[in-house]
Image (spheres, grey):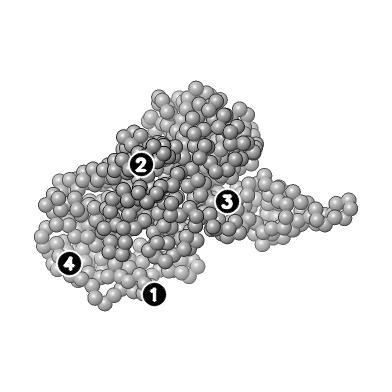
Amino acid sequence: MRTNNANGDMESVINVVLEGKKDSFPKGTMVKDIVSQLLDRAEAERVLCVMQGGVCLELNEPIMKDCELRSITFQDEEGRRVYERSLRFLFLLSMKRLYPDKQVRMLNSVGYGLYIALLEGEMGHGMTRAIQSDMEELARQDLPFHKETWTREDAIAYFQKEGWQDKADLLRYRPKEKITMYRIGALCEYFYGVMLPSTGYIKAFALKAHFPGVVLLAPSPQTPDVPAPYVQRSKFLREFSQSQQWCGILGAQNAVDVNRMIKDNKIREFIRINEALHDRSIAGIADEIVSRKARIVMIFGPSSSGKTTFANRLSVHLRVLGQHPKLISLDDFYRNRSEIPLEADGKPDLEHVNALDIPLLAQSLEGLLSGKTVSMPRFDFTSAHRVETGYDLSLADGGPLLLEGIHGMNDLITSEIPEQMMYGIYVSALSCINLDDHNRIRTTDVRLLRRAVRDMRFRNTSIEETIDMWPKVRAGEEKWIFPNQEKADVMFNTSLHYELPVLKTMAYELLLAIPKSAPEYLIAHRLLKVLHYFLPVGGDVMDEIPPLSILREFIGECSFYDTH
C-alpha cells in the first residue's frame, strides 16, 4: 500500500511489479517482504530469489527504486543453483562443527546430488549420519546467512587461517578489490553467487554414503519438497575416478594449478599430456570395439560435447586396427521442419526424438546390416529440409558403422538392433577442474562456452542468441539424453583441463559487453565469474592445440572439417 513519510515526501515510496501484480512500498523494503505481500502464501513460499532485468536479487535485498521483478523458484535453474549454494554452506558448517580438522573437496554432480570427498581419509556411514543429523538441526534453527563485504586481502587472510590455501591463492586472480562473504557463526564462505536468506529455507536434502565420500542430495525440479533418490551411476563414477587420476597425472585439480602452468611457461607440455591422455583412452575404446566384434557403434551425448570429432578420431584408431569404419550422423535423418513435433510455444522441438525420421533410420540400418547398399539421406540445416541427392553406403567390407547423434541409445532407435551387434559410447564433458575445493565448475557451463564460441565463429550466431537457446537445449538433454547415459558400454570424458583459458580468450570481451538490463546477463555474468579466475593464453599456446583435438571442433582449424 502506498505510504507517505511525515513530510509527504513521495520520493521515499517505490512502485514494484511482481508477476503482473503492482503495489507501492517504502523505499528500502526487502524483496521477501514484497513477495509476501504481492503473492499468496503458497506462491511466496516457493520463491527463492527474484530477477530484475538480467540481475538476480536475494530475498534480503532492499529495493531502492521502481522496478519490475520476476519470481525464481526451484523450477528455474537459477533457483536450484541458489538452493545448492546454500546447501553446500550448510554441509561445510556441519563439518566445521563436528570435524574441524577435516578438509573436503566438492567434486562433481551425480544426478541431483554432489559428490564430496575428504582430502585425506574416508567418510563412513557413521560420519555421514552425524553430518546429516547436524545439518537437519541447523536447518531447524533457521540461522540467517549474514552477508558481508570484505576486502580481498582480508578474505585471503581468513582462508589461509582456515587452511584453505587453494581459495586464498585463487582470490589473487580476482579483478575486484571487494568480495561478498557469507557468515554463520565462525564459518565464512564465498560461493560466487546469490544465497538464501537463512538455513530454514533448506527444507529437503539427504546424505548418501558412497565410498570413499558422500553424495549430498538436493531435490529434483519435479519434486522440490523432498530430496531426490540416490541413483547408482557406476559407469559415470568409474569415469570420474579416471578423471581424478588424470588430474594427478596432470598436476591440476583447481584453476590456480592451470594458471601456474601458464605463468611458468609449462602450458604447452600440459596441453600435450592432456591430448595424449585423450588419445590413449580412444585407442582403448577402439580395441574394445574390435574385441567385441561390434557392427554398430552408437556415439551419443549432450550438445557441445565433441561427439563429431570423437567419432572421427575413433574412426582413425579403428583403421589402425585394420577396420574399415563408416560414419553417419543422426542429424541427416531429421524430418523436414514442417513435420517436426511442436513445443508448447508452437516452435519446432528440435531436441525431440521424433524430430528424426525413425522409420527411415530403421530401414537404413536393416539394409546395411543385411549387406545391402543403401541410399542414405542428407539434411540441409540452412533450408531445414532433406536434400534430394543423398549418397550410397555399404558395409560390405565388414567394418563397423559409427552412428553419431544425441539420441544414439534411445530405445526407439536401438530396439530393432541385436544387442550383441551394438556398442554404446556416451560422450560428454563429464568432469572438470574446480575453481577451488568448495566450488566446482559445472560442465554444463563449459559446454555452453564451447557452443557460444563455435556458434559465433562458424554459425553466424551471436553469443546472446546462443544463451537464449540454451535453456531449451538443456531441457531436451534432461528428457532425452541423460536418462540413457548408463545404457552405454563405456563413457568418454571430453573435458580438457586447459580449455577454459582458451575459451576465455575468445568469449570474455563479448560476455562483458552484455548489459545488466539484458535477459542474457544472468548467464553471461555466471560464465564471467568462472572466466575471471583464469589467465588468458596467446597465439603461441593456441598453435600448440593439435588439429584433431576435441577443442578444435569449437575454436576452429580442425583438420576433419573443411569449413574449419
Disc nearer the start of the sequence (1/2): 2
Amino acid identity at mark 1: Ser
Location of mark 3 (residue): 73
Residue 267, disc: 2
Using the numbered discs, state the Cα–Cα distance from disc 3 to disc 4 in whole angstroms: 50 Å
| Mark 2 or 3, nearer chain start | 3
For residue 393, which numbered disc appears in the image? 4
- Residue 116 seen: yes
Quarter of image, res 94: top right
Within-10-Å neighbours for mark 3: few <14, some 14–19, many 20+:
many
In percent of width and height, residue 376 lies at 22, 69
Q: Secondary structure at mark 2?
A: helix
Q: Position of residue 539 (x, y in %)?
A: 37, 51
Place of residue 448 in the rendered image (x, y in percent of width and height, measured from the top left): 43, 54
Mark whose residue sits in front, 1 or 2: 2
The Cα atoms of the two marked residues, 4 and 1, are separated by 27 Å
Q: Residue at x 85, y 51 (%)?
A: 5
Cα–Cα span, label 2 and label 4: 43 Å
Secondary structure found at label 4: strand
Q: Quadrant of residue 534?
A: top left
Observer able to see residue 412: no
Q: Is residue 558 left or right of residue 49?
A: left
Residue displayed at 49% across by 34% down: 169
- Residue occupied by mark 1: 338
